Amino acid sequence: MSSGDIPASTFRAAAHRVADMIADYFERVGDYPVVPKIRPGDVAQALPAIPPEQPESMDRILDDYQRLVEPNTTHWNHPGFMAYFAITGSKPGVLGEALAAALNANAMVWKTGPAATELELRVCDWLRQMVGLPSEFQGHINDTASIGTLLALAAARHQAPGLDIRRRGMAGRSDLPALTIYASEEAHSSVDKAAVTLGIGTDNVRRLPTDDGFRMIPQALEQAIDEDRRAGRAPIAVVGTAGTTSTTSVDPLRAIGAICRRERLWFHVDAAYAGSAAICPEYRALMEGWEEADSVVLNPHKWLFTPVDCSVLLVRDPDRLKAAFSLVPEYLRTKEAGVTNLMDLGVQLGRRFRALKLWMVIRAFGAEGLRERIRHHGALAREFAERVRAEPGFELCAPVPFSVVCFRATSNASPEEQDRFNERLLDRVNAAGPVFLSHTKLRGRFVLRLAVGNLGTTAAHVETAWRLIREATVGMQ
């Protein structure tokens, strides 16, 4: 009977093959349809129902990867992927991910991951500097912005005066008022999920109306807070958005911040998508006032070309986060003084070495190289928006501050018939294969979204998307 890992020689040969497979994939990913032309269950039916009893060769395993996995994946790294928020797992980031997997570090406390801890703190500070937030902000990395928002709102709940929720909890308390969170009607659903997780409840997330640019209306926020206080509720936090999910609109963050300071509420800014663009001064200007926030979340895995998952939560006063979460069992007590233990900053004990891939991406491209790529994506989106604006029978449905365009086909038909037409149009365009778009609803109307964010996307890919849209429109009329 053998024991231990596979032989080094076997690993080395497989690793060389994997390196070639990854390089080949980057070169040919554009040849695949973005979304595989398979049916639900096709992959599962090709997989054995029971696990292998005996070892299998790495060559056979990699053969099956190439046969079953790669061609049956929705290719987020495809240059024609223009749905949701288009992303790239760049080559430097892939290398960083591989090295992190080899180290297998778990940075629960400094001692269990010295390099992972200190690199994470430093690379988050690099990012803070690049986006222009004040030096008092300290960052750490989570998996997604949903968790970053959850942690920020948990800290807001903890600091609410007189509640003592960390010790006493929320169940069975007649003295506990309804805690209230405020966000615009365009804010991400992660706000509601955080409210569910924290025991606040979705009924206590006040969704506020937006203006013609789909931005929160500060006067509506002030009115809602006043109404809730009069009704005996306890407002605890406001979530402003810098780059809403549907339209990438930016809330009036300075005005919201002033209200939060006056009302002593936690001010969290969800900049998951657009926050990365703040490395460009012209985009940073759109986020005026976010420096007044208590916390900001942004995702390098969206627009800084870092493989998922990598989301940075920047907090003005990390001690307030620690106050909500720090809990040190005896087996994790260490003697090092003056160090950061990442486990104190959230609910997770185990901490992946996510900083390594972000560190490698920033170094490989440089701040200026990253700016050039983001500006290129914005320019491609604006060019596409101009095509829509100039084409009879189409309309833009929202401003284009970054690299997402919201649009739809129009006609003299009823709104309901137009919505159904646009839904069929989206299905037909996506079925063609070269591009993948997504949709949303604005003011209840079905709207198409084209998002530029992949490193490989060129003007030719955007032109292909526009050609397919026009051809499908004509064919459906």
Image: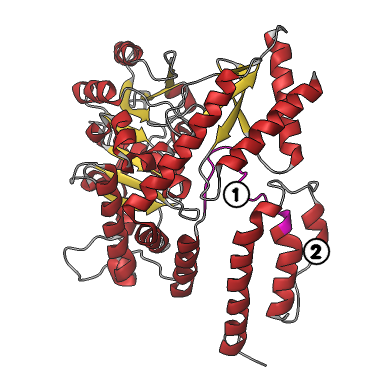
Q: CA distance from mark 2 to mark 1?
A: 28 Å
From the viewer's side, name the closer residue of 448 and 379. 379
Position of 244 compared to 293: left or right? right
**Kind of residue at badge 2:** Ala
Is residue 240 magenta-colored?
no
Residue, x 63% and y 21% (percent of image)? 408
Q: Which residue position holds label 2? A: 49
From the viewer's side, name the closer residue of 416 and 294. 416
| Image quarter (top left, top right, bottom left or bottom right) of the N terminus | bottom right
Determine the main secondary structure of the stretch shown in magenta. Answer: loop
Q: Which residue position holds label 1? A: 76
Give the residues in magenta: 71-88
Q: Are marks 2 and 1 in contact (CB under 8 Å)?
A: no
Q: Residues within 10 Å of mark 1 (few under 14, many from 20)?
A: many
Where disc 2 sits, the SS reads: loop
Q: Nearer the viewer, mark 2 or mark 1?
A: 1
Closer to the chain start, of discs 2 and 1, is: 2
